[in-house]
Image: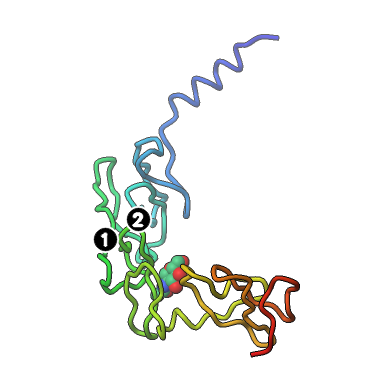
Amino acid sequence: MSFLPLLFVVLIALFEPISSVPAYEQCAGLGWDGIFRRCDDGLVCYARSEYYANCRQPNQCPSSWACTVVDSASTKVPPPKIIPVNGQCDNTSYTMCTSGTLCLQQTNTHSECRTQCPPSWLCDSGVLSEYQQCGGDGYTGSTKCAPGLRCYSHSKWYAHCAATCPGIGWMCESG
Ligand SMILES: *[C@@H]1O[C@H](CO)[C@@H](O)[C@H](O)[C@H]1NC(C)=O
């Protein structure tokens, strides 16, 4: 068999101009291959972050993205704004809580970057399911067991939610 036909295919592939990119496929981003690729006609290359951009309909960029319009390999996408501890946050704009914190909800309209959920905040209303830890020294999560469960203590350091007394060694006297 001759290799000539294969050689032609390879040559054609090498010299064909880079085709444009369809909707929702990557068009730019650091660490991709460094190249900006033009989107299909009518689409825009929007950056989610400096590492990723894809082709989307105009004005259809998610609010959690940087939404920088990338039109060449040299377009710079700014890094997300870092919100300090106790700063107001929303998890939906192009921002990040500073390392070690999460955007925790105080009320329906107010959230802050915190290391843990302060008592009485909305984020503290989570109820725990069976066998989830509900207490113990050093434990900072929710202490509310789901209906039908009780928080049983095993020691000073550990308690979990259960429907009935987990057994010998647990503090199960009623109360
Ligand atoms: C933000 O995301 C974190 C992690 O997914 C979540 O625990 C927190 O509830 C979210 N905050 C808001 C305000 O949606």
Instruction: Read off the residue under disc 1.
Output: 82
Figure quarter occupied by ligand 1: bottom left
Disc 1 or 2, which lies upstream in sequence? 2
Under circle 1, the secondary element is strand
Q: Amino acid at mark 1?
A: Ile
Instruction: Read off the residue under disc 2.
Output: 46
Q: Is residue 134 above or below residue 59?
A: below
Quarter of the C terminus within the rendering = bottom right
Residue located at (49% from left, 70% from top): 137
Residue located at (35% from left, 73% from top): 90
Q: Amino acid at mark 2?
A: Tyr
Horizontal relation, residue 103 to residue 157: left or right: left
- Residue lying farthest to the bottom in this orientation: 175
Residue located at (34% from left, 77% from top): 111
Corner quadrant of residue 163: bottom right
Horizontal relation, residue 93 to residue 18: left or right: left
- Packing grade of label 2 (10 A; few <14, some 14-19, many >=20) is many
**Mark 1 vs ligand 1: CB below 8 Å:** no
Q: Nearer the viewer, residue 71 or 137?
A: 137
Q: Residue 101, how many percent across, how many down?
A: 36, 64
- Packing grade of label 1 (10 A; few <14, some 14-19, many >=20) is some
Q: Nearer the viewer, residue 88 or 48?
A: 88
Q: Is residue 64 above or below residue 69?
A: below
Q: How many numbered marks, from 0 up?
A: 2
Under circle 2, the secondary element is strand
Q: Is residue 43 above or below residue 160?
A: above
How far apart are the two marked residues, 1 and 2, measured between alpha carbons?
21 Å
